[in-house]
Image (cartoon, rainbow, N blue to C red):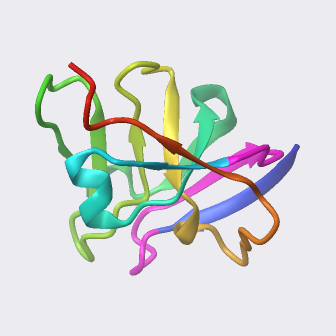
Amino acid sequence: MEMHKGSCHCNAVQFEIESDFPELTTCDCSICVKKNALMIRVHETSMRIVSGKENLATYQFHTNTAEHYFCKTCGIYPFHRKRVTPDYYGVNVFCLEGFSSEGIPVRATVGAGMK
């Protein structure tokens, strides 16, 4: 497992994740499509918010179970708590420092059809 640092665009929110990146995911739900998210699934014990927790805003919709986090300053989505597995985060890999998704398989997940 490797430790990776991440942040929003303005660096107000900083976090770390630990992952070996077995796969990345996309989602076809209405919010993920609009934000064009490419995510890594990380258990809550493998993620730590280093600074800026107070700068996070939460957006919820549909069942109001998943928690989508955004920086209040720059508006960037760094991660969300997953609806079906709330002890996991979906982390936006584009917020990770120096990260390349090259060679990592991408799995499309179905979110639009979830009831």
Location of residue 78 by image quarter: bottom left
Q: Is residue 57 visible?
A: no
* x and y, in percent, of residue 81 in the image: 40, 34
Q: Residue at x 83, y 45 (%)?
A: 20
Identify the residue shown where x is 27% and y is 77%: 74
Task: Choose between 107 and 101: the one closer to the eye.
Answer: 107
- Residue sitting at the far right: 1
Answer with left or right where residue 53 lies relative to residue 115: right
Q: Is residue 53 above or below residue 89?
A: below
Front-most of 91 and 101?
101
Q: Position of residue 88 (x, y in %)?
A: 53, 28
How many discs appear? Answer: 0
**Residue 4 percent across, percent down from the top left:** 73, 59
What secondary structure is the stretch in magenta mostly built from? Answer: loop
Q: Is residue 82 above or below residue 24?
A: above
Quadrant including the N terminus: top right
List x then y, in percent, for residue 110. 39, 36
Instruction: Name the side, left or right, on which 71 lies relative to 64.
Output: right
Please state which of residues 29 and 21 is positioned toward the viewer in this rendering: 29
